[in-house]
Image: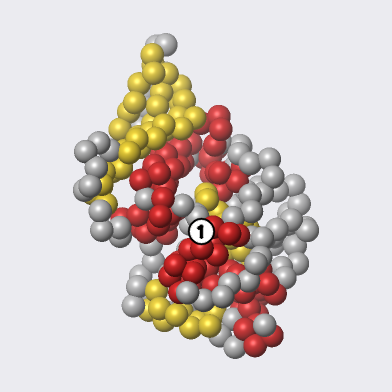
């Protein structure tokens, strides 16, 4: 394992070459105040490789606080792009749910009237092999926990969370192992998805995978009581476009 800590793992993402080593991940792609183990670093690199994620474009990074299991964060933008690349994907509709004069109204987009009260978000995902769209409605109370971005942009955030949840239901084989930061906030304890991740990596690579309890999530960083300094950005190894 020490070789992987120093020797870069190389793989392609959207036609661009990405190089990752354990030392590189530990120095530049880990956030939080916990000490990430070598096994967690190797699992992160394997997931980036087999999920085709470029961490230098903020598509994925690690978070660890104290002795809790490391969390693999995957951006919602990268999550949504994976859904869009599915051969049976045929677009989506999404918006917010508001209380308007005592009546629940689904509004397309992320704009409400001044007297409307934001209740939640909704999304519909269309597949070419389904007669009806996959529809999801989520509650603001279950997703917003007072994070800075949710306070600043609650309409946009609840709409985007609805899209992510609907896409996961529409494409469980492709997106089933990806959990958003929103999902993590609703869990009392971190969910061990090791077996799910192992099965997915075997499906794509047929390689041996370490049995490491890592919780895979996406989205924004959970606000913790303990503060930490933001790591310096590492120079991008490839010049491909961001998402």
Q: Which residue is mark 1?
A: 74
Seen in the picture, residue 51 relative to 208 is either above or below; the reply is above
Seen in the picture, residue 171 relative to 85 is either above or below; the reply is above
- Report the residue at 52% width, 68% height from top: 47
Q: Secondary structure at mark 1?
A: strand
Of residue 219 and residue 167, the one placed in the foreground of this image is 167
- Report the residue at 41% width, 31% height from top: 137
- Report the residue at 21% width, 48% height from top: 128
Residue 82 x %, y %: 37, 59
Of residue 234 and residue 184, the one placed in the foreground of this image is 184
Is residue 216 something one can see in this rendering?
yes
Residue that protrudes farthest toward the top in the picture: 102
Residue 175 x %, y %: 43, 54
Seen in the picture, residue 114 relative to 83 is either above or below; the reply is above
- Report the residue at 34% width, 26% height from top: 106
Residue 38 x %, y %: 70, 74
Residue 178 x %, y %: 50, 54
Seen in the picture, residue 103 relative to 203 is either above or below; the reply is above
**Quadrant position of the N terminus in the picture:** bottom right
User: Which class describes the residues within 10 Å of circle 1: few (<14), some (14-19), or many (20+)?
Assistant: many
Horizontal arrangement in the rendering, residue 202 relative to residue 124 (left or right): right
Residue that protrudes farthest toward the right in the picture: 67
Horizontal arrangement in the rendering, residue 45 relative to residue 173 (left or right): right
């Amino acid at each position: 394992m020490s070789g992987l800590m120093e020797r870069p793992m190389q793989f392609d993402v959207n036609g661009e070459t990405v190089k990752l080593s354990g030392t590189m991940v530990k120095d530049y792609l880990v956030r939080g105040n916990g000490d990430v183990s070598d096994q967690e670093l190797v699992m992160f690199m394997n997931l980036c490789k087999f999920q085709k994620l470029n961490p230098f474009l903020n598509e994925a990074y690690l978070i660890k606080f104290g002795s809790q299991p490391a969390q693999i964060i995957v951006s919602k933008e990268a999550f949504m792009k994976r859904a869009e690349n599915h051969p049976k994907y045929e677009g989506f509709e999404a918006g917010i749910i508001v209380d308007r004069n005592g009546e629940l109204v689904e509004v397309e987009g992320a704009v409400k009237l001044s007297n409307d009260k934001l209740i939640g978000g909704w999304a519909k995902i269309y597949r070419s092999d389904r007669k009806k769209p996959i529809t999801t409605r989520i509650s603001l109370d279950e997703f917003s926990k007072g994070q800075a971005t949710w306070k600043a942009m609650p309409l946009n955030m609840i709409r985007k969370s609805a899209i992510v949840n609907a896409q996961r239901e529409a494409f469980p084989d492709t997106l089933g192992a990806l959990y958003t930061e929103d999902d993590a906030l609703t869990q009392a304890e971190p969910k061990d998805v090791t077996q799910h991740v192992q099965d997915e990596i075997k499906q794509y690579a047929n390689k041996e995978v370490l049995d490491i309890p890592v919780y895979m999530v996406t989205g924004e960083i959970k606000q913790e009581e303990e503060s930490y300094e933001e790591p310096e950005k590492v120079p991008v190894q490839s010049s491909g476009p961001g998402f």
